[in-house]
Amino acid sequence: MILGNLNVEKNERVHYPQVRRLEAEGLPSKQAEAITAAITEVLNGSLENLSLSVVSKSEMQKSEMTQEANLSKLKSEVQSSQEHHFSLLQHENEKLRHDIEKMRSELRHEIDKVTAEHRLDLNLERGRIRDELTNQNAVTSNLTNKLDREIHALEAQLEGAKYDLIKYCIGTLVSITAVGLAVVRILM
């Protein structure tokens, strides 16, 4: 039924131009019809085989529409997957930023803590040195005062010894002079 008019029943008389041409060439009409019918059957079989292997336009359009639908579905899935992966990447990126910020904060805290400990240690050391210096100044002041007292005492002793020495020298001179005068008086 593919060629329409080419399908012929065996009992039916074929009136195709090929039959008339064969008859004009001298073939009897039954032989001409038989040859034309055989050729028609071969052509119909070939066309049926061809129609089975060839897709019709409507099937092709249906297939195209299915492929377009599958393609658009695939595109939407790919786009959805990309959006999902992008959102996951953004989430991971934000998580990493948060972790980095947390580490920075902890690092700043540790640095501040160490700095505060060092400042405290320095202030304690400064206070200890200040106390030591104050103690040294007090000891130095006490020693200076003691030395000053001892120097004044020595100066006083020296003055006293000097006075005593002068007194003894004068007494000795006066005694020697008196003895010398007594000797001179006796001798004279």
Image (cartoon, helix red, strand yellow):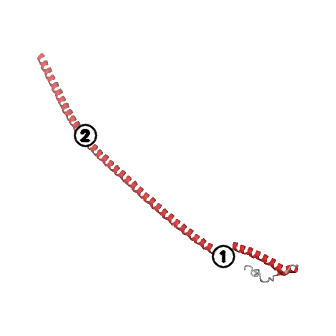
Q: Quadrant of the N terminus?
A: bottom right
Q: Earlier in the sequence, mark 2 or mark 1?
A: 1
Residue type, numbered disc 1: Glu
Q: Secondary structure at mark 1?
A: helix
Q: Is residue 113 above or below residue 64?
A: above
Q: Is residue 14 above or below residue 105?
A: below
Amino acid under disc 2: Leu
Q: CA distance from mark 2 to mark 1?
A: 122 Å
Q: Is residue 22 left or right of residue 105?
A: right
Return the residue nearer the eye: 21 or 161: 21
Location of residue 16 in the rendering, given as x and y in whole percent from the top left corner: 81, 82
Circle 2 packing at 10 Å, graded few (<14), some (14-19), many (20+), is few
Secondary structure category for the residue under label 2: helix
Tell me if residue 63 can be seen. Answer: yes
Foreground: disc 2 or disc 1: 1
Towards the viewer: 146 or 106: 106
Left or right: residue 146 compared with residue 78: left
Name the residue that disc number 1 marks. Answer: 59
**Residue of label 2:** 143
Q: Is residue 145 left or right of residue 69?
A: left
- The percent coordinates of residue 123 (x first, y second) are 33, 50
Location of residue 10 with respect to 100 vertically, above or below:
below
Rendered position, 137 above or below 85: above
Which residue is drawn at the image coordinates 36% and 53% (left, top)?
116
